[in-house]
Image (cartoon, grey):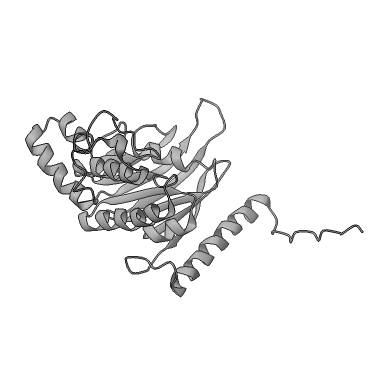
Amino acid sequence: MGATITLDFITHRFRAGGAPTLENIDNRIEAGERVALIGRSGCGKSTLLHMLAGLLLPSEGCVRVNSHQVTKPSAKWNMMFQKPSLYPWMSVQENAALGLLFAGQPKQEASARVSELLDKVGLHDKKDVNVQSLSGGQQQRVALARSLATDPEVLLLDEPFSALDAFTRSALQEDVPAICGARGITMVIVTHDIDEAITMADRVLIMSQNPGRIVSELKVDLPWPRNSSSQEFQTLRNELMQRFRDTDDGLSGRKSQPEPAVRRVV
Protein backbone atom coordinates (compact mmCIF):
# COMPACT_ATOMS: atom_id res chain seq x y z
CA MET A 1 0.00 0.00 0.00
CA GLY A 2 1.04 3.57 -0.58
CA ALA A 3 1.79 6.03 2.18
CA THR A 4 0.24 9.34 3.18
CA ILE A 5 2.69 12.26 2.92
CA THR A 6 2.17 15.30 5.14
CA LEU A 7 4.07 18.54 4.54
CA ASP A 8 3.88 20.53 7.78
CA PHE A 9 4.69 24.20 7.04
CA ILE A 10 8.08 23.50 5.50
CA THR A 11 10.61 26.29 5.08
CA HIS A 12 14.08 25.62 3.71
CA ARG A 13 17.25 27.71 3.65
CA PHE A 14 20.55 26.51 2.25
CA ARG A 15 22.39 28.50 4.93
CA ALA A 16 21.40 29.81 8.34
CA GLY A 17 19.96 33.30 8.11
CA GLY A 18 19.77 33.16 4.32
CA ALA A 19 16.74 33.85 2.18
CA PRO A 20 14.30 30.92 2.10
CA THR A 21 14.26 28.68 -0.96
CA LEU A 22 10.90 27.26 0.15
CA GLU A 23 8.46 28.87 2.55
CA ASN A 24 5.40 27.56 4.42
CA ILE A 25 4.78 24.52 2.23
CA ASP A 26 1.66 22.96 3.73
CA ASN A 27 -0.07 20.09 1.93
CA ARG A 28 -1.18 16.48 2.25
CA ILE A 29 -0.79 13.74 -0.35
CA GLU A 30 -3.09 10.79 0.19
CA ALA A 31 -1.98 7.16 0.09
CA GLY A 32 -1.93 5.92 -3.51
CA GLU A 33 -2.37 9.41 -4.96
CA ARG A 34 -0.31 10.48 -7.98
CA VAL A 35 0.78 14.12 -7.72
CA ALA A 36 2.79 16.39 -10.03
CA LEU A 37 4.81 19.40 -8.84
CA ILE A 38 5.12 22.01 -11.55
CA GLY A 39 6.70 25.45 -11.61
CA ARG A 40 9.40 27.55 -13.20
CA SER A 41 13.09 26.68 -12.88
CA GLY A 42 14.45 27.70 -9.50
CA CYS A 43 11.14 27.55 -7.63
CA GLY A 44 12.37 24.71 -5.39
CA LYS A 45 10.54 21.71 -6.85
CA SER A 46 13.56 19.41 -6.72
CA THR A 47 14.55 20.73 -3.30
CA LEU A 48 11.11 19.81 -1.99
CA LEU A 49 11.34 16.36 -3.59
CA HIS A 50 14.75 15.79 -1.98
CA MET A 51 13.20 16.56 1.40
CA LEU A 52 10.46 14.01 0.75
CA ALA A 53 13.24 11.49 0.07
CA GLY A 54 15.14 12.37 3.24
CA LEU A 55 18.13 13.69 1.29
CA LEU A 56 17.62 17.21 2.71
CA LEU A 57 16.11 18.37 5.98
CA PRO A 58 13.74 21.34 6.31
CA SER A 59 14.99 24.41 8.15
CA GLU A 60 11.53 24.67 9.71
CA GLY A 61 8.55 22.31 9.75
CA CYS A 62 8.74 18.63 8.86
CA VAL A 63 7.86 15.96 6.32
CA ARG A 64 5.90 12.95 7.55
CA VAL A 65 5.27 9.66 5.77
CA ASN A 66 2.48 7.75 7.52
CA SER A 67 3.02 9.97 10.60
CA HIS A 68 6.72 9.03 10.65
CA GLN A 69 9.00 12.07 10.45
CA VAL A 70 11.41 11.81 7.51
CA THR A 71 14.97 12.46 8.67
CA LYS A 72 16.93 10.16 6.33
CA PRO A 73 16.51 8.08 3.16
CA SER A 74 14.57 4.81 3.31
CA ALA A 75 13.84 1.89 1.00
CA LYS A 76 10.16 2.68 1.60
CA TRP A 77 10.42 5.95 -0.34
CA ASN A 78 12.50 5.54 -3.49
CA MET A 79 13.62 8.20 -5.93
CA MET A 80 14.30 8.19 -9.68
CA PHE A 81 16.55 10.94 -11.04
CA GLN A 82 17.05 12.43 -14.50
CA LYS A 83 19.89 9.95 -15.07
CA PRO A 84 19.40 6.27 -14.23
CA SER A 85 22.73 5.98 -12.30
CA LEU A 86 23.38 2.34 -13.18
CA TYR A 87 26.60 0.38 -12.77
CA PRO A 88 27.86 -0.03 -16.36
CA TRP A 89 29.81 -3.25 -15.72
CA MET A 90 26.71 -5.07 -14.42
CA SER A 91 23.86 -6.75 -16.22
CA VAL A 92 20.28 -5.47 -16.27
CA GLN A 93 19.21 -8.01 -13.65
CA GLU A 94 22.19 -7.30 -11.38
CA ASN A 95 21.50 -3.55 -11.46
CA ALA A 96 17.79 -4.00 -10.78
CA ALA A 97 18.48 -6.32 -7.80
CA LEU A 98 20.93 -4.03 -6.00
CA GLY A 99 18.41 -2.56 -3.55
CA LEU A 100 17.24 -6.01 -2.49
CA LEU A 101 20.79 -7.28 -2.07
CA PHE A 102 21.75 -4.23 0.02
CA ALA A 103 18.70 -4.97 2.19
CA GLY A 104 20.04 -8.48 2.84
CA GLN A 105 17.71 -10.51 0.63
CA PRO A 106 19.26 -13.76 -0.67
CA LYS A 107 20.51 -13.51 -4.24
CA GLN A 108 18.19 -16.20 -5.61
CA GLU A 109 15.09 -14.55 -4.10
CA ALA A 110 16.22 -11.14 -5.31
CA SER A 111 16.74 -12.47 -8.85
CA ALA A 112 13.26 -14.02 -8.92
CA ARG A 113 11.67 -10.81 -7.68
CA VAL A 114 13.54 -8.68 -10.20
CA SER A 115 12.72 -11.00 -13.10
CA GLU A 116 9.02 -10.41 -12.48
CA LEU A 117 9.52 -6.63 -12.46
CA LEU A 118 11.66 -6.63 -15.61
CA ASP A 119 8.81 -8.43 -17.34
CA LYS A 120 6.44 -5.66 -16.24
CA VAL A 121 8.68 -2.88 -17.57
CA GLY A 122 9.22 -4.60 -20.93
CA LEU A 123 12.78 -5.88 -20.45
CA HIS A 124 12.09 -9.62 -20.18
CA ASP A 125 14.54 -10.36 -23.02
CA LYS A 126 17.29 -8.06 -21.69
CA LYS A 127 17.91 -9.54 -18.22
CA ASP A 128 21.43 -10.77 -18.93
CA VAL A 129 22.45 -7.88 -21.18
CA ASN A 130 25.05 -5.38 -19.98
CA VAL A 131 23.34 -2.03 -19.33
CA GLN A 132 25.87 -0.17 -21.46
CA SER A 133 24.27 -1.67 -24.56
CA LEU A 134 20.79 -0.36 -23.70
CA SER A 135 19.13 2.80 -24.97
CA GLY A 136 18.44 5.68 -22.58
CA GLY A 137 14.79 4.70 -22.28
CA GLN A 138 15.67 1.07 -21.52
CA GLN A 139 18.13 2.21 -18.85
CA GLN A 140 15.39 4.27 -17.20
CA ARG A 141 13.21 1.15 -17.20
CA VAL A 142 15.98 -0.68 -15.34
CA ALA A 143 16.10 2.16 -12.82
CA LEU A 144 12.31 1.92 -12.47
CA ALA A 145 12.50 -1.83 -11.80
CA ARG A 146 15.21 -1.21 -9.21
CA SER A 147 13.05 1.43 -7.51
CA LEU A 148 10.03 -0.89 -7.41
CA ALA A 149 11.92 -4.00 -6.27
CA THR A 150 11.87 -3.05 -2.57
CA ASP A 151 8.06 -2.60 -2.60
CA PRO A 152 8.21 1.14 -1.80
CA GLU A 153 5.28 3.02 -0.34
CA VAL A 154 6.33 6.18 -2.21
CA LEU A 155 7.96 6.68 -5.63
CA LEU A 156 9.56 10.09 -6.19
CA LEU A 157 10.43 11.16 -9.74
CA ASP A 158 12.74 14.09 -10.50
CA GLU A 159 12.17 14.77 -14.22
CA PRO A 160 13.27 11.21 -15.10
CA PHE A 161 12.07 11.37 -18.72
CA SER A 162 13.45 14.78 -19.73
CA ALA A 163 16.35 13.39 -21.81
CA LEU A 164 14.34 10.70 -23.62
CA ASP A 165 12.94 10.71 -27.13
CA ALA A 166 9.26 11.54 -27.53
CA PHE A 167 8.10 7.97 -28.16
CA THR A 168 9.92 6.46 -25.17
CA ARG A 169 8.86 9.32 -22.96
CA SER A 170 5.21 8.90 -23.94
CA ALA A 171 5.34 5.16 -23.17
CA LEU A 172 6.86 5.71 -19.73
CA GLN A 173 4.38 8.48 -18.96
CA GLU A 174 1.68 5.82 -19.30
CA ASP A 175 3.55 2.89 -17.76
CA VAL A 176 4.77 4.50 -14.52
CA PRO A 177 1.42 5.81 -13.20
CA ALA A 178 -0.23 2.55 -14.31
CA ILE A 179 2.26 0.48 -12.26
CA CYS A 180 1.91 2.83 -9.28
CA GLY A 181 -1.88 2.64 -9.53
CA ALA A 182 -1.87 -1.17 -9.72
CA ARG A 183 0.41 -1.43 -6.67
CA GLY A 184 -1.16 1.41 -4.70
CA ILE A 185 2.13 3.34 -4.60
CA THR A 186 2.01 7.05 -3.80
CA MET A 187 3.75 8.88 -6.64
CA VAL A 188 5.18 12.42 -6.74
CA ILE A 189 6.77 13.72 -9.94
CA VAL A 190 8.61 16.98 -10.56
CA THR A 191 8.16 18.27 -14.11
CA HIS A 192 8.29 21.43 -16.24
CA ASP A 193 5.95 19.84 -18.78
CA ILE A 194 2.25 20.71 -18.41
CA ASP A 195 1.16 17.83 -20.67
CA GLU A 196 3.26 15.39 -18.64
CA ALA A 197 1.69 16.62 -15.40
CA ILE A 198 -1.84 16.05 -16.73
CA THR A 199 -0.89 12.70 -18.29
CA MET A 200 0.59 11.26 -15.09
CA ALA A 201 -1.13 12.87 -12.10
CA ASP A 202 -4.39 12.82 -10.19
CA ARG A 203 -3.57 16.29 -8.89
CA VAL A 204 -1.16 19.03 -9.97
CA LEU A 205 0.44 21.40 -7.44
CA ILE A 206 1.60 24.72 -8.93
CA MET A 207 4.57 26.43 -7.31
CA SER A 208 5.63 30.06 -7.35
CA GLN A 209 9.22 31.16 -6.81
CA ASN A 210 11.36 33.49 -4.66
CA PRO A 211 10.58 31.83 -2.29
CA GLY A 212 8.93 28.63 -3.50
CA ARG A 213 5.34 28.16 -2.37
CA ILE A 214 2.41 26.01 -3.44
CA VAL A 215 0.01 28.63 -4.72
CA SER A 216 -2.61 26.58 -6.57
CA GLU A 217 -3.69 23.03 -7.30
CA LEU A 218 -5.70 21.38 -10.03
CA LYS A 219 -7.49 18.04 -9.81
CA VAL A 220 -7.15 15.90 -12.93
CA ASP A 221 -10.36 13.91 -13.14
CA LEU A 222 -9.76 12.01 -16.40
CA PRO A 223 -9.88 8.27 -17.15
CA TRP A 224 -6.66 6.26 -17.45
CA PRO A 225 -4.76 6.11 -19.71
CA ARG A 226 -4.99 9.78 -20.57
CA ASN A 227 -5.81 10.84 -24.12
CA SER A 228 -3.92 14.06 -24.84
CA SER A 229 -5.98 14.75 -27.97
CA SER A 230 -9.32 14.71 -26.13
CA GLN A 231 -11.27 17.91 -25.52
CA GLU A 232 -11.27 17.24 -21.77
CA PHE A 233 -7.47 16.99 -21.73
CA GLN A 234 -7.10 20.23 -23.67
CA THR A 235 -9.54 21.99 -21.35
CA LEU A 236 -7.46 21.00 -18.32
CA ARG A 237 -4.28 21.96 -20.14
CA ASN A 238 -5.65 25.44 -20.83
CA GLU A 239 -6.81 25.76 -17.22
CA LEU A 240 -3.38 24.78 -15.89
CA MET A 241 -1.65 27.17 -18.27
CA GLN A 242 -3.96 29.99 -17.17
CA ARG A 243 -3.22 29.31 -13.50
CA PHE A 244 0.47 29.38 -14.35
CA ARG A 245 0.03 32.80 -15.97
CA ASP A 246 -2.05 34.04 -13.02
CA THR A 247 0.77 33.02 -10.70
CA ASP A 248 3.25 35.08 -12.71
CA ASP A 249 0.84 38.06 -12.79
CA GLY A 250 0.33 37.85 -9.04
CA LEU A 251 4.07 37.86 -8.40
CA SER A 252 4.67 40.82 -10.68
CA GLY A 253 1.78 42.76 -9.16
CA ARG A 254 0.27 43.52 -12.52
CA LYS A 255 -1.63 41.85 -15.33
CA SER A 256 0.29 40.74 -18.36
CA GLN A 257 0.38 43.38 -21.05
CA PRO A 258 0.34 42.60 -24.78
CA GLU A 259 3.65 42.79 -26.58
CA PRO A 260 4.18 46.24 -28.15
CA ALA A 261 3.82 46.38 -31.90
CA VAL A 262 7.12 46.43 -33.78
CA ARG A 263 7.42 49.55 -35.90
CA ARG A 264 8.72 48.76 -39.30
CA VAL A 265 11.32 51.19 -40.63
CA VAL A 266 11.34 51.62 -44.39
Q: Residue at x 51, y 62 (%)?
A: 240
Q: Please tell me which residue lies in front, 162 or 208.
A: 162
Residue 99 appears anywhere in the view:
yes
Q: How many marks?
A: 0
Instruction: Give the image location of residue 125, x and y in percent.
Output: 19, 47
Residue found farthest to the bottom:
231
- On screen, residue 240 versus residue 154, left or right, reads right
Q: Quadrant of the C terminus?
A: bottom right
Quadrant position of residue 35? bottom left
View extreme (right): residue: 266
Q: Where residue 19 sits: x, y (%)? A: 57, 32
Q: Position of residue 238 (x, y in %)?
A: 53, 66
118 or 106: nearer the eye?
A: 118
Q: Residue at x 54, y 40 (%)?
A: 42
Q: Residue at x 24, y 46 (%)?
A: 153
Q: Quadrant of residue 62?
A: top left
| In the foreground, 262 or 217 | 262
The structure residue drawn at horizontal position 68% and vertical position 53%, both measured from the top left corner, is 253
Can residue 62 be seen from the camera position used here? Answer: no
Residue nearer the viewer, 130 or 30: 130
